[in-house]
Image: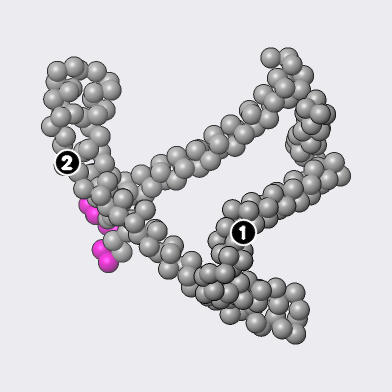
Amino acid sequence: MDTLWIWIAAALTLMILSFLYKDNPLYKISEHLFVGVAAGYGLAVEYFNVFKPNLQDPLLAGNDYWLLFPLLLGLMMFTRFNSKYAWISRWPMAYMVGIYSGMAVIGFTEGDLMRQVEGSIIPPVSSAAVGGFISNPGVITALNALANPIIVFGLICILLYFFFSLEHKGTAGQFARIGTGLLMVGFGAGYGYTVMTRFALLIDRFYFLLSDWLHVI
């Protein structure tokens, strides 16, 4: 059975990669199969990890009857499939959007905004890093000594770029342009990280084909 599933996985992988040549029926079959399997797997995970322990089991145990409210909201979502009663689904949808928006604001503030502020509150020059460079001169120690000045200078330039009440001319404009370049570097690094992630997935598939399927490596 293991050999059979390896051949099935290899065939589906090649069918997906066939899109590199052109769009074809084999690719569409594998794409639809992947979407269907992923949807079914996600539904099973949601049922056993979320719905059953958090709603079904407490209700069957005879306690936490307040859980009937989220159950009712969930059932109201299915009225979306009936054009006559589709307006009912707007109420649970509005409730979910409001709840998750509030949670997202709190999560973003604590996880991103405050962490960024904390990370930018640093001394312009790190005495420990400078001392490390003096005691052991080298490329790494030099970069460590320059890290804080670069971060502080880059933060000031980026903030000047977003300071729209000041016209970007003269000295302020020059610093704002530097901030623009630093932002582009940050966006490029994020995009490069995404590309590297995709290449890692591609390498994993090629390794599977050459190792587990063909036993070449």
The residue under the point 78% across, 27% down is 2
The residue under the point 60% across, 32% down is 199
Q: Amino acid at mark 1?
A: Lys
Position of 190 with respect to 131 (left or right) is: right
Q: Earlier in the sequence, mark 2 or mark 1?
A: 1
How many other residues sit within 10 Å of disc 2, few (<14), some (14-19) or many (≥20)? some
Badge 2 vs badge 1, beta-carbon distance below 8 Å: no
Locate the C terminus by quadrant.
top right
Rendering coords of residue 20 (x, y %): 75, 36
Mark toward the viewer: 2 or 1: 1
Rendering coords of residue 64 (x, y %): 52, 70
Q: Nearer the viewer, residue 15 or 191?
A: 15
The residue under the point 40% across, 43% down is 186
Residue 18 in magenta stretch: no
Residue under circle 1? 52
Q: Residue furthest front?
A: 62
| 95 up-or-down from 56: above or below | below
Locate the N terminus by quadrant.
top right
| 54 up-or-down from 143: above or below | below
Rendering coords of residue 135 (x, y %): 14, 18
Provide the secondary structure element on which disc 2 rests.
loop
Q: Which quadrant of the structure image shows residue 151?
A: top left
Position of 76 with respect to 63 (left or right) is: right
Provide the secondary structure element on which disc 1 rests.
helix
- Magenta region: 165-173
